[in-house]
Image: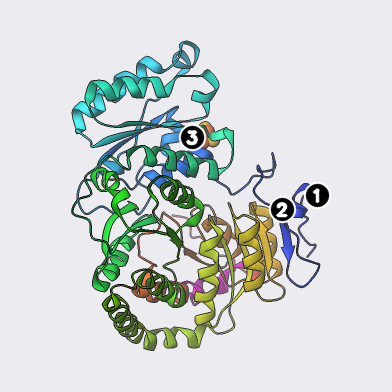
């Protein structure tokens, strides 16, 4: 079989460890025509803000943009579920010609009257940037009339990369932080940033911190509530997961409110434990917190270790390709897969920066391909050439894996089971095991199976 070629202009964003000195370009706009796997600016802001469950999320644009968001994500709420509805101004030709501001004001007013949300987020999409609606002015006017925060999210899809969407979301959150009371907040308190409660993960993580004796002031944004976010400036520490999306907010809070931040990951035994110890270390005045953390980590690891050992027996030596949004998640996945005896043959991300890729270089084995802002062709090439047994990615990588005839594990916002925390590591191992060991792959053409001709009996 001839090798699948790479587009010349994409070559500098792909590097194979051990071949040449390290060099990879990143943090740039996707190559036109390359069919990038990367999501648009609007999507970046939507994934960050969407889990706030008592706010209205209004997509100002054509209905197509909103279709992407309608209840496909696994962010759970313990109370209101407004976030599961997808509202759109449904801009038509007439609005594009004459402007959509009046329609936006009318829709916002109607939604706020009907649903009584704690806040409203208004997302600008590509066409809104082109026709030049003054979304901020409309939001200010409705905010005055209705008495709740109405926040413009400047997320016109074409104006940058998914990272610019994260920034737009952080700007919107920053506007409501600092507007709530903080008198009852403990000195041993944190905000959890970049945790979106997929399959209930924020609940698992929150419980760990509470068992340690640390107060969680707000989670941004999993199972999010506007009133909690308003109080976030009262916490002693910001703990940032999904660093690509929320580091900017943590930096803004550090500058304005003097709250320090640390970067953590909740995936895999090693990183989960490190996250808890790193937080405990921040409260040296209360040694009980560290003592409780040690005890809890011991208990949790002991509970899952026997099952992990069973899964490992079948997974030893299997090969995985990882393609995720933020590179930080890839680090944890590489370590988690090593726990299961698996090797990573490709590691890539949509939004990694120089520092992320240097860390990936150090973490990966020789022969691993590192790729920034990949497209389906590149992923297919390495899945075939490196003979992967498993792909870990999101909704856009799933069909690629299945077409290539390999197992798949969804590690993105669309999944329904928690993969964070110790229980999440157990779930991850089970899902990887189930998919990799499925007998169905024996019938995939890439595995050399010849599909037998089926006799069809005419009725
Ligand atoms: S790229 Fe533009 S048109 Fe497409 S979903 Fe994003 S905002 Fe909407």
Question: Residue 381: x, y in percent?
Answer: 70, 61
Over which residues does the magenta segment extend? 435-444
Characterize the magenta stretch by its predominant secondary structure: helix
Between 32 and 101, the one lying in front of the other is 101
Name the element at disc 1: helix
Name the one closer to the observer, 365 or 144: 144
199 w.r.t. 141: above or below: below
Q: Secondary structure at mark 3?
A: loop
Q: Position of residue 429 (x, y in %)?
A: 43, 76
Name the residue beneath numbered marker 3: 155
Identify the residue at the far front of this view: 285
Which numbered mark, 3 or 1, is in the foreground of this view? 3
Q: Residue at x 30, y 78 (%)?
A: 287
Q: Is residue 443 magenta?
A: yes
- Looking at this view, name the residue that lies furthest to the top: 98
Q: Quadrant of residue 366?
A: bottom right
Q: Which callout, 1 or 2, points at the residue further toward the start of the chain?
A: 1
| Mark 3 CB near ligand 1 (8 Å cut) | yes
Q: CA distance from mark 3 to mark 2?
A: 24 Å
Mark 1 to mark 2 CA distance (whole Å): 13 Å
Crowding at mark 2 (Cα within 10 Å: few <14, some 14-19, many 20+): some
Q: Is mark 1 within 8 Å of ligand 1?
A: no
Residue 1 x, y percent position in the rendering: 78, 65
Quadrant containing the C terminus is bottom left
Relative placement, left or right, of 19 versus 252 is right
Q: Which residue is mark 1?
A: 8
Q: Is residue 18 above or below residue 398?
A: below
Residue 61 picture location, percent across and down: 44, 27
Q: Is residue 455 visible?
A: no
Residue named by callout 2: 25
């Amino acid at each position: 079989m001839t090798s699948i070629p790479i587009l010349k202009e994409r070559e500098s964003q792909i590097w194979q460890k051990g071949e040449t000195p390290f060099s990879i370009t990143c943090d740039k706009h996707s190559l036109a025509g390359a069919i990038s796997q990367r999501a648009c600016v609007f999507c970046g802001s939507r994934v960050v803000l969407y889990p706030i469950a008592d706010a209205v999320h209004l997509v100002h644009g054509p209905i197509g943009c909103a279709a992407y968001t309608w209840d496909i994500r696994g962010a759970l709420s313990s109370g209101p579920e407004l976030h599961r509805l997808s509202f759109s101004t449904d801009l038509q030709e007439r609005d594009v010609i004459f402007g959509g501001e009046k329609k936006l004001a009318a829709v916002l007013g109607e939604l706020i009257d009907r649903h009584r949300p704690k806040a409203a987020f208004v997302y600008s999409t590509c066409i809104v940037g082109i026709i030049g609606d003054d979304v901020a002015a409309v939001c200010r006017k409705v905010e005055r009339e209705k008495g709740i925060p109405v926040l413009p999210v400047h997320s016109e899809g074409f104006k940058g990369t998914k990272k610019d969407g994260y920034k737009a979301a952080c700007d919107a959150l920053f506007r409501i932080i600092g507007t709530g009371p903080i008198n009852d907040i403990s000195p041993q308190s944190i905000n959890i940033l970049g945790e979106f409660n997929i399959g209930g993960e924020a609940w698992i993580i929150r419980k760990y911190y509470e068992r340690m004796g640390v107060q969680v002031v707000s989670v941004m944004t999993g199972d999010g509530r506007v009133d909690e976010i308003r109080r976030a400036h009262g916490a002693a520490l910001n703990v940032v997961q999904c660093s690509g999306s929320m580091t900017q907010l943590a930096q803004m809070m550090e500058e304005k409110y003097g709250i320090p931040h640390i970067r953590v990951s909740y995936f895999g035994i090693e990183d989960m434990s490190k996250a808890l110890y790193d937080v405990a270390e921040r409260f040296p005045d209360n040694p009980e917190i560290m003592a409780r953390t040690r005890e809890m980590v011991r208990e949790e690891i002991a509970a899952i270790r026997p099952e992990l050992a069973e899964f490992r027996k079948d997974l030893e030596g299997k090969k995985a390709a990882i393609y995720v949004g933020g590179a930080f998640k890839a680090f944890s996945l590489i370590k988690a897969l090593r726990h299961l005896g698996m090797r990573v043959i490709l590691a890539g991300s949509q939004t990694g920066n120089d520092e992320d890729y240097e860390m990936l270089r150090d973490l990966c084995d020789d022969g691993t391909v590192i790729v920034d802002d990949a497209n389906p062709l590149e992923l297919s090439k390495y899945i075939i050439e490196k003979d992967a047994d498993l792909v870990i990615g999101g909704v856009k990588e799933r069909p690629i894996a299945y077409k290539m005839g390999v197992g798949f594990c969804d590690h993105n916002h669309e999944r329904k089971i928690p993969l964070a925390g110790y229980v999440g590591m157990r779930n991850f191992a089970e899902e990887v095991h189930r998919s990799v060991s499925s007998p169905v792959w024996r019938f995939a053409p890439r595995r050399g199976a010849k599909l037998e001709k089926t006799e069809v009996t005419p009725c």
